Amino acid sequence: MDNKNNNSDLIIYGINPVKEALSNGNVIQIHISENFAKNKRVIEIIKAAENNNISIEIINNNTFKNKFSFNHGQTIAAKISLNFNLHIEDIINTEPGENSNILIIDKVQDPRNLGALIRSAESAGFDGIIISSNNSAKINSTVAESSSGAISHIPLITNQNINQLIKKLKDYNYWVVGLDMDGDKEYKNYDFTGNVALVIGNEGSGISKLTKSLCDQIYKITMYGKTESLNVSVAAGIMMFQMKF
């Protein structure tokens, strides 16, 4: 079977995530509470969905909450289909003179951290994300919500061995750098150009030993206060934008 046809369906909530998914052609069906159907921004979504022949279900508010176990204010949901099983060749850069950045996520277990990482990578203009197949948070509605719609706009590769993919990236002339507390170089001194992949590790233990050994350079963010470390998504965001500076 071709992995590229192996899509995953999930439910997302809220106006912005639904709007972003709709703009990228990922929406299968939209569900709206009747109490929310007259919201101006929701009306825009309904019109866009109708123009694209996407099924819309408007239901009683209590029925909506019972159906989706959802208690937030924005009672709009959408079933979307995303392809998380791309090949490395789908996201690498082969154009001379153009620089590419890829984020590699090693065993991040909190779905909200994973969603925030996806959001930061998309915002920083990264070309794709590779997520470790072992001991990592699974892509679900919480991840999608935390990404604020970014999950619809950046390619993801999941359920593959990241160490094998790192070796493939090197075959395609990518530099691989890591961000870890025990890095030997300050992030402000980032000095790589060309195609670069950034590795981010687990919230507690950082980058796995083998994965770290495959990195060409390990950077750190020095703490100046009493806090020992930053949240993984915050640290990664700082590094990603430094790479684009």
Image (cartoon, helix red, strand yellow):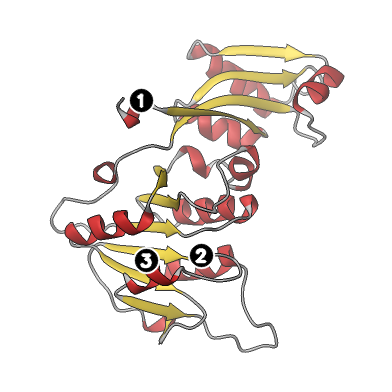
> How many numbered marks have been drawn onto this rendered protein structure?
3
Ranked by sequence position, the earlier of labels 3 and 2 is 2
Query: Considering depth in this image, is 201 or 96 the residue closer to the camera?
Result: 201
What residue is shown at x 45% (from left), y 70% (from top)? 239
The secondary element bearing badge 2 is classed as helix
The answer to the question of whether label 2 and label 1 lie on touching residues, with beta carbons closer than 8 A, is no
Q: What residue is disc 3 on?
A: 244
In space, the residues marked 2 and 1 are separated at their CA atoms by 31 Å
Give how far across and how far down residue 142 sits, in percent: 65, 42
Ranked by sequence position, the earlier of labels 2 and 1 is 1
Label 1 crowd bin: few (<14), some (14–19), many (20+), radius 10 Å = few
Disc assigned to residue 112 = none
Q: In which quarter of the image is the C terminus?
A: bottom left
Tell me if residue 124 comes above or below residue 207 in the rendering.
Answer: above
Query: Considering depth in this image, is 175 or 74 the residue closer to the camera?
Result: 175
What residue is shown at x 61% (from left), y 70% (from top)? 204
The answer to the question of whether label 3 and label 2 lie on touching residues, with beta carbons closer than 8 A, is no
Q: What residue is disc 1 on?
A: 5
Q: Does residue 190 appear left or right of residue 33 in this picture?
A: left
Give how far across and how far down residue 214 sits, in percent: 31, 69
Please say whether residue 61 is visible from this viewpoint.
Answer: yes
Tell me if residue 157 comes above or below residue 222 in the rendering.
Answer: above
Q: Quadrant of the N terminus?
A: top left
Q: Quadrant of residue 230?
A: bottom right
Which is more foreground, mark 2 or mark 1? Answer: 1
Label 2 crowd bin: few (<14), some (14–19), many (20+), radius 10 Å = many
Q: What residue is disc 2 on?
A: 237
Q: In which quarter of the image is residue 96?
A: bottom left
User: What kind of residue is marked 2?
Assistant: Gly
User: What kind of residue is marked 3?
Assistant: Lys
Ranked by sequence position, the earlier of labels 3 and 1 is 1
